[in-house]
Every structure is written in C-alpha cells, then in structure tokens.
Image (cartoon, grey):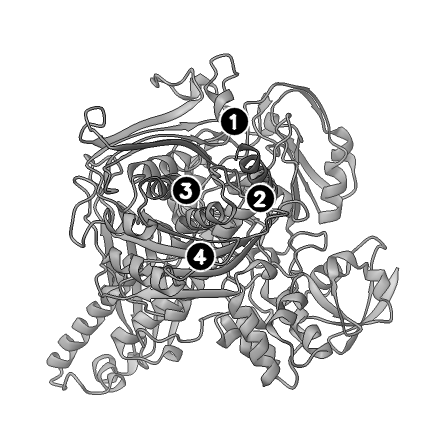
Amino acid sequence: MIGTSIPRVGGFERVSGSQQYTADIRLDNALHVKLVSLSCARARIQAIHTADAAAAPGVRAVFTASECPHPMPRFGPVRADRPLLAIFETKFSGEPICVVAADTEDQAASAASLVRVEFEERAPVLDVKSALDPASALVQDPALRPNDPLAHTNILQEWQFGWGSVEQASADLIIEHDYSFPMVTHFAIEPHAFLAAPDANGVTVWSPTQHPYVLQRVVAATLGLPLSSVRIIAPDSGGGFGGKGWPKFEPLLAWLALALGRPVRLVLSLEEAFQAARRTSAHIHARTGFTRNGRIVFQDIRADFLLGAYADIGGRVVSKASYAACGPYRTPHARVLARALLSHTTPSTAFRGFGTPQASWAVESQLNEAAAALGIDPVEIRRRNVPAKGESFIPDDTPADGEWATALERASTAIGWDTKRPAHHGRGISIGLKSSSTASRSVAIVRLHFDGSATVLCGTSDMGQGARTVLTQIAAQELGLAAERIAIVMGDTAVVPYDSSTSASRSTVFMGNAVIRACESITTQLNTIAAAHSVREDAPRGDLLNVHFGPTRGEIIGIGEAGSAFEPSHPLGGRAAFWELMCAACEVRVDPETGAVSLLRLVLVSDVGKALNPRQVETQDEGAAVMGMGHTLMEQLILGADGRILNLGSLDYRIPSIKDIPASFESILIENGDGPGPYGSKGAGEGGTLAVAAAIGAAINEAAGVHLRELPLTPERIWRAMRETERNS
Amino acid sequence: MTITLVVNGTARTLDTPAHRTLLHVLRDDLNLTGTKECCAEGECGACTVLLNGRAVNACLVLGVECDGEDVRTIEGLGAGGRLDPLQNAFAESGAVQCGFCIPGMIVAARYLLSTNPNPSEEEVKEGLAGNLCRCAGYSRIISAVVRAAKA
C-alpha cells in the first residue's frame, strides 16, 4: 500500500464529469451576485448612483459601503486591513465598490452595468521605486497601523536576518547584481466561486478554500460571530496554488447572505480571478563573496518585495523567503534586509514556492556567474558549498536533513552534464530549497465502523495534489484495510477536526502523522477490548466488535494530533519542520535569429524521504516545473499607467500549453526515509517552482552568450541581449 | 426561442434567449455541470464539447445555433454504463490532478482519436493544443491519450 501508486481517490468523478466544484453547486433560492469595480487602480469615489440598477428586473439588492455596517468591517488573515467594499478610495484595479444581487446571473450582470460611478483618478503606486518614494501617496491609511513606526510609509514591514559579519568578511571575488521577478497570476483553471447561506447556527460559506479553518476564523471575526456559528464547506478546488488560500470575497458574501436572509452565489470570471490574487513580485540586489575556490564567504542581500494594496499573507511570504534566502549552502556570513512594500495593485498572496522562487532566481544566478568568473563548473561550485546531511547552515534552525549533494549528482548525470553541447545549446543546473511549515497543528479523527470498515475525517484540502489518496493509503496501511473499505471526508468544518492549513507542503507529514496516531489509538482500544473479552488480538475485527458491542452495535473512534509548537523567540515562530529540496537541470536551444527558446530536456530531482504514492509525487513535480517554466519564459502581468492589468485574461496572458513542454522530461525521486512524516516521508510539490528559473536562465545565458537577470526571459529580451552582445564584441 | 437539441443521445427541448451560449444552456438549463467554464473566450478549452461529432468551445457557440443538432458532453462519452477508454486511461495514467481541465481535455482527445485513431505524440500535442492545464506537466495526459488509442 505504501509506496504504491494506487489510483487517485476521486479520479472517477473527475473523468466522468460528476465531480462537484463550487460553481457546480446549486442552492435553492440563491441570488446571483455581481461585483462592480473600476478599471483604474486608484480613484477617489465621489458618488455611486445605484437607483437604475436597483430598479432593473430581478434585482433584490444593490449595496455600497454606505449599506455596510459602520465602522466598515475589515478582514485579513494577519492584519484586518481589507474592507468588505471600498469606502472612499479604490486601492487596486478590480477592488469592488458595489455589489448587486439578482435572481439570475444575466440580471445581475445587466444591473451591474447600470451602476454609475463618479470618481476622480489619482496617481497610483505601482512599483518598488514609487512605493519607496516619500513623495508618493500612502496606499494604506496610517490610522490602520497605530503604534507602527512605518505607518507613514508604504513599507508594511521590514526584516533583517543574518549572522557573522558581512562587513568584515573578505572575499577573492565579489559578484553583485540586481534581479527581478515579475507579477504573475495563479491562473487556476477554476476561477474562484463562492456561496453563502444563513442557517440555523449562523452562516455557511462554500469556498474552494485551501484552509477551511483560516476562513472560518476570518469570517467569524469580520462579522463578530463565534466560531461555532460559522460553517465552511470547502469543495475540492480546481487548482489552488496559494490563490485560494486566504479569504477574498467570502466575508462580503457571508455578510450579504445574513443581511438578505437568503443564499447568495458569486462566480468570478477569469479576469476577476486575475484581479483577485497574484504572486508577490520582487527586486533583489545580491552581493555574494567567494574564495577563488568558489566557496561562499558571504551573502549580502537586499530584497524588496512588492505586495498589493492589502497585506493578505504577503508579510509572511517575505519573511519566510528572506530568512532562508541564502539557499542550501554554507554561508559563513550573511545579511538579508527585506521589505514588504504596499502598492495599488492586486493583493499579492501565497503562491507555490512562497517567496523562495524569487530569492532562488537571484542566489542561484549569482552562483552560476561566480562559476563562470572563476572557471569552475556550475555543478562543482555547488558541490563545494552544499552542506552535508546533519550540518547546520542557518544558525539555530533545522540542519540539512537530506543527502543534498546526491540530488546534484543525480541531476547532472541524468542531463548528461559533461557531454558536448551542440551549437546554440546551453545547459543549466540549480538547487531550490524551501522550509516547510514552522508552527502548525493537524488533528485527524478515524472512525472504525461496526463492520470493520473505516472513515477518516480531516481538514486537509485536496486541490489536485492527491491528499485524499495519500491519507487513504496511510489509514489503509495502519488498519490493515483495503482502500475500498476506507472513506475519507474532508472540507467541512462542521464535520472534520481542526487543521492549520494545506500549505508549505506540510500535509503528508502532519495530517499523515495525525492519521497514524488516530489509527494507533484505535488499535490500542481494540487490544484492550480483546483482553477484556479474552479474545485473541489477531481475531477478525468484525468478531471482536460484535462480541464487544453486542446487539446495540457501536463504533471505535480514534483521534490523533500532530504539529510543531510555536516558538516565540524564533523569527518565524518555529524552526523548519523539514526542508524541501529540488535540483533541476535542463538543456535548451536558443534560436540565434529570433531569441526563441526550445526547452529540450528537463530533469527534476526531489529529495522526498519516502514517496507514499510515487506517481502523485512525480506528477506534482512535473506540474510545478511547468509552472516554473511559465514564470521563467512567458508569464508577466503588464500594468498600464493607471494600474489596470493590460493582459487580463487568457488571450494575452500566456501560460505553458501542451506544446511548450520539453521533449524529454524526467522526474527522479530520492528516498532515504529521512523525513519526519509517515514512513520517513517529507513533503513535496513546490520544488519545481523553486529551481527551474535559474536552471533555464543559466542554459539560455550559455546558449545565447547573454546575462539576463529579469524574468520572464521572453524571446524579445533574449534577442535584444544577443544583439547588444554582438554590438559590444 | 424554443430549441430542441439532442444531448448525450436524448432530445431536450427548452426556451432560451438568443444570446445564451451552449455552455450556459448545458450547465444551467440542463444541469449538466461536467462541462466547465474558465476563460469564456475560447482560449482554454475547459468547455470543449462535441457538436455533431466535432470538438467546439461551448462558450463560443450560441444555444440557438444548436437547434436540431447533436451535442455530446463528458457525461455522455461512455456507453452502456461503462467509461470511454479515454476516461479509464486518464484515471489510470496520473493525468488527473485537480480535474477541472479534464472534461474538456478528454472530449478534445475523443475528437482527436475519432479523426486520427493512432496519433503520434506530436499529433496528440497538436490535437490538445487548445486545452490548458495548470496542474500537470501535460506529459501524463499525452501518455493517457496514446494508451487509450491502443486500447
């Protein structure tokens, strides 16, 4: 069972069309909701004329900030900064200023177009430079940040991490450059959809959220309700990637449902989904000192991450990524200065990799450049700096917990690193490292039924990574049951116990361990029963339960919990539960005439401890790598001067299609059983987004004779750089 | 307008305004929610259905254009209570992750195989070029189609 690629639980429903995503759910008597927003990013609202919309056929409500409670409820997972509807000023293109509820979707859309807004555009803050300029407007009202010395700036938060003394360190070679990582959007194929309905206990909200319990506490806090009054039902999502992690429009809908006393339904268009969530973009200035043998002496990094108009989880993205920005390397001296900056753009949120793809792009590129300058092979320079298993590389944090050098060897061998490169070809290699969760908690309940079958209840969400399948496998293994005799229930806070989140690649480890402990509790109870009835422990379970319960029947319930304690003195609240590491190697060809890139070969090596379902791990790695290809070669949100997204939607925002994947694509798993999860497993699924950019970037730089440091590496950028190189030579 | 269309082998008659797309007729009027809505502009392929046996983006076809026509959706691909070989191949090959792109992907693949029963990998890529997936690396989808073609 463990280590077997059993078919995906829920696979049948997905191939037959019967899987119910949130937009497929029908509630009787539901009103359809449409949001009204302005196209420009920042505008002073002078008046909103809703009378025509309110009089339109089928319309039941047209609400603006005036109809919301006073003071306006604000929400957010860390800072409650975001209003249900914009009050005096819009802060990002697509921020809702009015909500229309009508009997049908068509009626809501028609009515929404009748809402007239008088507004005055203001100059928006759209980039790092402008955010830092003291002459620029403040994105957020300083009154929302009392006692915050940064309240009169657009710096939401800043951090300094490091050790040793960068100032006193002396190096034979210093590489210093600026790198940038663009704004990109999750583009899950399922745009966000939400439902909310009043019920006997309070309110139920349906959302394809990755973290039902986070959503529960945020909705409850926003509306002033006890947790017991808020039920979150989280249907499996059609792709999350972080974009469905943190509350977006659920608090608004929950309030609306209670205000109207009826169910309400909102399905975002793809364009609205683009406006709702994005990755945090970054400008990173990296200064790295090396000995002439290629050993890192110091890393001196200044990272400016551009958040959107509201904090969302952006602060955490910056702190986590910056803390470990030096990567999987021995770094005797380190200094990382990081800032999270507000702007009048889509609120940035979690996105697979959680800040590390941005940092990796810079740090790995630095290593490649040092290799070239010192005449050391890029694989070799990494070999000289990668810590051994058990070795500390960030003081007072979890040491290297894998044979990381092995990943490097496997990747370089698989790509044929030392073989001759044809003309216009290049190869690149890169290691990405990310910490898993720090402090967190997962609880699982397992119910052993009277006939010996079982049901697992857990709050993990399955957004395609296959959580249902893996947790079923674990329960099957522990209870000695066939997978067909196990049901798994997820995604309903009224039914499943508490789970912190499905994030940071943590669920196999923590929810998996919780399930194991719940099963152990059942086994212990069964052994006690066997002793009490003088029945052999290995007697058929059905007989045991029958003898114990008799004609009244019954069930055995096991509860298990797993997590990491909060450490108040740690800058991130706790050490890394484990490290997620991927090494990517690739070969590309760059057309010398056009700059077009053909990704010929991609090899991914992940250090996973134990692959409980190998096929699921491999497919997650491949998906992450293709997503990494996207931000490396083609994806970027392009903003107009007024802050609106110019390439809104699928025609103008390019994600990899089936024609873009490498001709040769290999996914290798290293399994040393050295993870803290079930059977020695670690987590996986984000690695591909960490390592791919620098590997492809290095390969392009080699193939084309250029040095590109700004993503994405579009054919145009490559072509211009090639022509520049020619002019200079 | 009143229209009658054959959907998954059954004649359905309904009233619909002329501007409604086949996608909305299927999902909202006929409660066939297997076909998905994503980009609404014919780029992502999530809404792929067969119209008179040819793959189309249901978001770009009006319901009224289908009066008297034959429509087949993901729900109607199998026969006699059994899944289409493509559906089995997708489920067994690791091609399915979140699943949202899968109905459109399978229908597009069904059309490809109906015109090209033994496609090469390159031909599969061409045939599915109009279907976006954000979860997978696409490679398992390709091998699922090749596998189904041999079944």
| Residue under numbered circle 3 | A361
Along the line of sight, which residue is nearer the eye, A704 or A116?
A704
Give the CA distance from mark 4 to mark 3: 15 Å
| Residue under numbered circle 4 | A586
| Residue under numbered circle 1 | A127
Chain letter of the residue carrying label 3: A
In this rendering, the label closer to the viewer, 1 or 2: 2
**Which tag, 4 or 3, sits closer to the chain's start?**
3
Give the CA distance from mark 1 to mark 4: 32 Å
Q: Quadrant of residue B14?
A: bottom right
Label 2 residue SS: loop
Give the CA distance from mark 2 to mark 4: 17 Å
Quadrant location of the N terminus of chain A?
Answer: bottom left
In this rendering, the label closer to the viewer, 3 or 1: 3
**Which tag, 1 or 2, sits closer to the chain's start?**
1
Label 3 residue SS: helix
**Which tag, 1 or 4, sits closer to the chain's start?**
1
| Residue under numbered circle 2 | A714
Along the line of sight, which residue is nearer the eye, A570 or A385?
A385
Amino acid type at circle 4 is Cys
In this rendering, the label closer to the viewer, 4 or 3: 4
Disc 2 residue crowd, few under 14, some 14–19, many 20+, Cα 10 Å: some
Along the line of sight, which residue is nearer the eye, A24 or A227?
A24
Q: Are marks 3 and 1 in contact (CB under 8 Å)?
A: no
Establish if A184 lies above or below B141.
above
**Which tag, 2 or 4, sits closer to the chain's start?**
4
Amino acid type at circle 1 is Asp
**Which tag, 3 or 1, sits closer to the chain's start?**
1
Co-location on one chain, circles 4 and 3: yes
Give the CA distance from mark 1 to mark 2: 21 Å
